[in-house]
Image: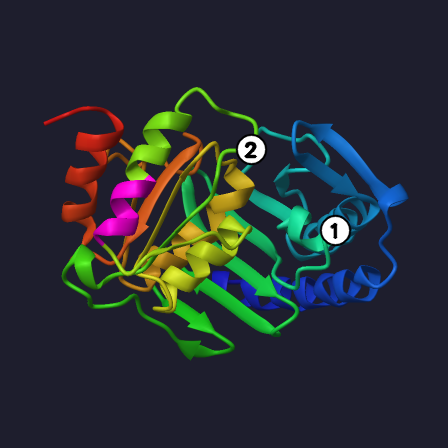
Amino acid sequence: MNTSQIIGKAMVATEKAGAFLLESARKISKSDIEIKGSNDFVTFVDKTSEKMLMEELSKILPGSSFIAEESGITEKRGEYTWIIDPLDGTTNYIHHIPLYSISIGLMQGEDMIGGIIYEPNAKEMFHAIKGEGAFLNGSRIHVTKNQKMADSIWATGFPYHQFDKLQEYMNFIAWSMQYSHGLRRLGSAAIDLAWVACGRLDGFFEFGLKPWDVAAGSLLVEEAGGKVTDFSGGDKHIFNQELISSNPYIYQEFFENFHKIFFGNE
């Protein structure tokens, strides 16, 4: 199978898992919620969704390995590696806020070659294949063409357990609120990136991220014509726990101001 066929089959599996999320949302209760860490939650839904996905993806690519949030698997093994978040936006989910997603990235060696983000409430299926573009429900998508921060709208995520750079982060958020159309906090990094890819947002930045939060979304943004880096401007955003993504026109203005305010660099 080529990458397009692999991702096509994976999208079918993702849609099935999304139906399970919707069905289970009506049944979730406080007793179903486990606490992994400070403000870090997991439910039977996360675990069951991940198991479903791993079983189906293993059939599509026998012998492939996984980096997956709930199973604790964090190392690539073999040629192909799936990077999975079975429910990105668990806090939204347990509070019955209908904005969460499934995120699946596919790596071949060190290269991200495929990505899927599915938002089951709106039935929006985003996917990207390296070198072939990014799509929403089968239609090609592109990042915005805004040229200036003053005309842009951004998303971010608030730190919930890593607070060593909290004041610097809040300083930059204050600047962003004054010199853009505003900031949004959606509660799912995967959706943030998907929305940058399809032009609903001009950019997204956050730190404290995990590979399963950003693997699929970073490829979506790149294949939609955008730029994705870590906070230093390098290409380690998937495993470096920090990410900036935007359209290519506005990136430099954002990056320069981010470094000046966040790191104190002139």
Query: Residue at the location (24% across, 25% down)?
Result: 263
Amino acid at dot 1: Ile
For numbered disc 2, what is the local secondary structure? loop
Horizontal and vertical percent position of residue 208: 47, 31
Horizontal and vertical percent position of residue 241: 44, 31
Horizontal and vertical percent position of residue 165: 39, 24
For numbered disc 1, what is the local secondary structure? helix
Question: In the displayed structure, does residue 131 sit left or right of residue 180?
Answer: right
Question: In the displayed structure, does residue 203 sit left or right of residue 19?
Answer: left
Amino acid at dot 2: Tyr
Query: Residue at the location (55% across, 67% down)?
Result: 5
> Which residue in the protein does label 1 denote?
94
- Residue, far left: 266
* Residue range (magenta): 173-179
Residue 198 covered by magenta stretch: no
Crowd class of label 1 (few under 14; some 14 to 19; many from 20; radius 10 Å): some
Report the predominant secondary structure element of the magenta stretch. Answer: helix
Residue 175 covered by magenta stretch: yes
> Which residue in the protein does label 2 denote?
160
Query: Residue at the location (28% across, 54% down)?
Result: 246
